[in-house]
């Protein structure tokens, strides 16, 4: 056997025991008469010692030549370490080596395999197999394993059955672009990779599976960012014979279990907020409620004077920054520059200092008196010592801009503690949203979401006002899961397709299999899908998901390690009945 123990296992209780270890050379220190080598594997690090008094000359020479990341096997005796290292679990002992076998040599790595490395992100992605050896990445992958095992154990105990669904499916319009796969056996036809197992999990409910889950890969061909990948993983769940309340209770239980099991934190409250209130108070549908700074809409108290910028705006809205009156003019100017960045897009920012003596000083004192500014403070909930930041413009845009500013200020103020977990249900989303480009309504979630009870008739008169029987689970300002009660009868589903602009022929061509299934006793059903990558990152106290994915892709959707995507040769194109028409 290559090893009797791992490199994180040995303690003082093993002193005088003969052991065999194998792993990678982390580093060595040569003092001439003695060589220390740190040997590393997945489990930890153990110090090896070679000295000229007890080590044969030939082995001593080989020890001196060991380079970083050499793979070696050693046999020897566990001895007490003269200079103990309290920062290492194995710091009380070392191995006096009696046999040394070099299993594989290593080139000098392109970056240091240390917790704090000198390698940039792109370089580390190119050599991801080396990056995984570093503790931050290794521990993140092990943490992901811990979360997924907790999910499987919990759902299995709750009676859910794990069922796999196909990866090669039919392309259907679900919002994002599909990745398509040409079929060799069916020339000119294509599979699509699933954006989610949505229709399959509904068919499983028709099939009587009752409670389904799957930890499943999903694929969307869309623009990327730090928390988005072209292939991502969902905890996909569906239940039959349920109402919305059953779904919320079931997955509050799962979330509560995960936070407790993985982080040792008890989460009791899962407050609920209407979508309209989330947009009004926080400017987005996934508000971070670990801190305050709720929006105050100022139209009634700011549009009665001669300040044209506010008077012309659809919405004037502000937030009170706790303790913000201590900001210098330079710091406030930096905030103004920050909101004017293209990523945020504001034209400027008005501010008002709420002094400790109760007086106000604003950047628009020319237009507003102390009574006016006191009204601003009342609407935004400002207290003496705070700073009121105000933006104005078109309603949806200015809400998004102030939401971005709110999150930036919270980060600067240290209000986004990753060890605090604040879940929130956001409810009653619009069923449909208007698309200016196509000049028609699109499903805000997907075409299988049911309207709220009693609102079906409203589709005929005011489709934009219809609320969906849908819900998102938000954790610390991130959407970690979303779902809905589904349509489960053919007539309602046909009506929904009609309002989404499908002809009966198009609906049958795209979703005829589902419509047919609804004719054979489909039960009421609904579900929720968690974004596993994002959920794991939040539970792990991180903002981005890449270190929790073994082999991630960059912002251009490329795997720089294996250099994919890549061209295929002409023979493959011919076999697949494909012809390229590349435009320069």
Image (cartoon, rainbow, N blue to C red):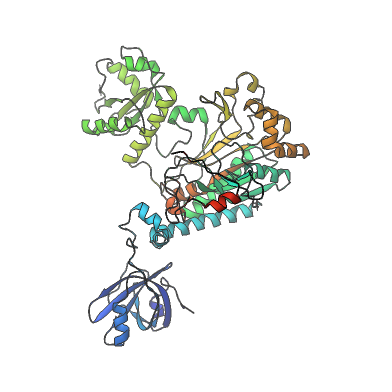
Residue 207 appearing in the image? yes
Residue 328 appearing in the image? no
Q: Position of residue 458 (x, y in %)?
A: 64, 21
At 70% across and 30% down in the image, what residue appears?
505
Horizontal side of residue 119 vs 426, given as left or right: left
Horizontal side of residue 68 vs 438, given as left or right: left
Q: Position of residue 246 (x, y in %)?
A: 63, 41
The count of marks equals 0
Residue at the farthest right position: 520
At 51% across and 58% down in the image, what residue appears?
145
Q: Quadrant of residue 513?
A: top right
Q: Position of residue 428 (x, y in %)?
A: 57, 31
- In-front residue for pair 459/480: 459
Q: Quadrant of residue 466?
A: top right
Does residue 481 sit above or below 1 in this rendering? above
Q: Position of residue 182 (x, y in %)?
A: 60, 47
Horizontal side of residue 458 vs 259, given as left or right: right
- In-front residue for pair 210/564: 564
- In-front residue for pair 465/89: 465
Does residue 325 sit above or below 157 in this rendering? above
Horizontal side of residue 533 vs 498, given as left or right: left
Quarter occupied by the C terminus: top left
């Amino acid at each position: 056997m290559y090893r009797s123990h791992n490199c994180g296992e040995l303690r003082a209780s093993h002193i005088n025991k003969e052991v065999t270890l194998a792993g990678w050379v982390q580093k060595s220190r040569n003092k001439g008469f003695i060589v220390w080598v740190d040997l590393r594997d997945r489990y930890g690090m153990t110090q090896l010692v070679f000295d000229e008094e007890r080590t044969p000359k030939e082995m001593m020479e080989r020890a001196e030549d060991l380079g970083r990341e050499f793979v070696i096997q050693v046999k020897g005796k566990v001895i007490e370490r003269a200079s103990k290292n309290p920062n290492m679990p194995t710091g009380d002992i070392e191995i006096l080596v009696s046999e040394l076998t070099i299993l594989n040599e290593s080139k000098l790595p392109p970056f240091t395999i240390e917790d704090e490395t000198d390698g940039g992100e792109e370089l580390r992605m190119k050599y991801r197999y080396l990056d995984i050896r570093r503790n931050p990445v290794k521990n993140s992958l092990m943490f992901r394993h811990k979360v997924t095992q907790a999910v499987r154990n919990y759902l299995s105990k709750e009676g859910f059955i794990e069922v796999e669904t196909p990866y090669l499916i039919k392309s259907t319009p679900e919002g994002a672009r599909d990745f398509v796969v040409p079929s060799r056996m069916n020339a000119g036809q294509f599979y699509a990779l699933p954006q989610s197992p949505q229709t399959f999990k509904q068919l499983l409910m028709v099939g009587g599976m009752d409670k389904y889950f799957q930890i499943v890969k999903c694929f969307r061909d869309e623009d990327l960012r730090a928390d988005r990948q072209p292939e991502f993983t969902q905890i996909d769940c569906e239940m039959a014979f349920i109402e919305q309340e059953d779904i919320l209770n079931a997955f509050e239980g799962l979330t509560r279990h995960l936070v407790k099991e993985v982080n040792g934190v008890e989460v009791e409250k899962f407050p609920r907020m209407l979508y309209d209130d989330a947009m009004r108070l926080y400017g987005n549908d996934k508000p971070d409620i670990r801190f305050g700074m709720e929006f105050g809409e100022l139209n009634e108290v700011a549009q009665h004077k001669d300040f044209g910028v506010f008077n012309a705006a659809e919405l004037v809205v502000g937030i009170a920054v706790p303790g913000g009156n201590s900001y210098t003019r330079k710091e406030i100017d930096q905030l103004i520059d920050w909101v004017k960045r293209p990523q945020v897009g504001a034209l400027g920012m008005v501010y008002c200092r709420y002094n400790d003596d109760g007086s106000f000083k604003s950047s628009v004192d020319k237009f507003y008196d102390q009574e006016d500014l006191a009204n601003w403070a009342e609407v935004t909930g400002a207290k003496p010592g705070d700073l009121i930041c105000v933006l104005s413009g078109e309603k949806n845009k200015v809400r998004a801009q102030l939401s971005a500013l709110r999150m930036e200020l919270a980060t600067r103020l240290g209000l986004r503690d990753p060890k605090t977990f604040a879940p929130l249900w956001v409810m009653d989303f619009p069923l449909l949203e208007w698309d200016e480009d196509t000049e028609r309504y699109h499903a805000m979630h997907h075409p299988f979401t049911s309207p709220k009870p009693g609102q079906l008739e409203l589709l005929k008169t005011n489709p934009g006002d219809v609320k969906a029987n849908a819900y998102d689970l938000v954790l610390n300002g991130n959407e970690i899961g979303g779902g809905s009660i589904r349509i489960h009868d053919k007539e309602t589903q046909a009506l929904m397709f009609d309002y989404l602009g499908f002809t009966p022929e198009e609906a049958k061509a795209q979703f005829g299999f589902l419509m047919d299934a609804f004719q054979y006793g489909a039960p009421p059903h609904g579900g929720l899908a968690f974004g596993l990558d994002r959920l794991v990152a939040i539970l792990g106290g991180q903002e981005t998901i890449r270190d929790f994915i073994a082999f991630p892709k960059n912002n251009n959707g490329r795997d720089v390690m294996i250099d994919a995507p890549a061209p295929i040769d002409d023979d493959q194109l011919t076999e697949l009945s494909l012809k390229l028409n590349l435009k320069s």
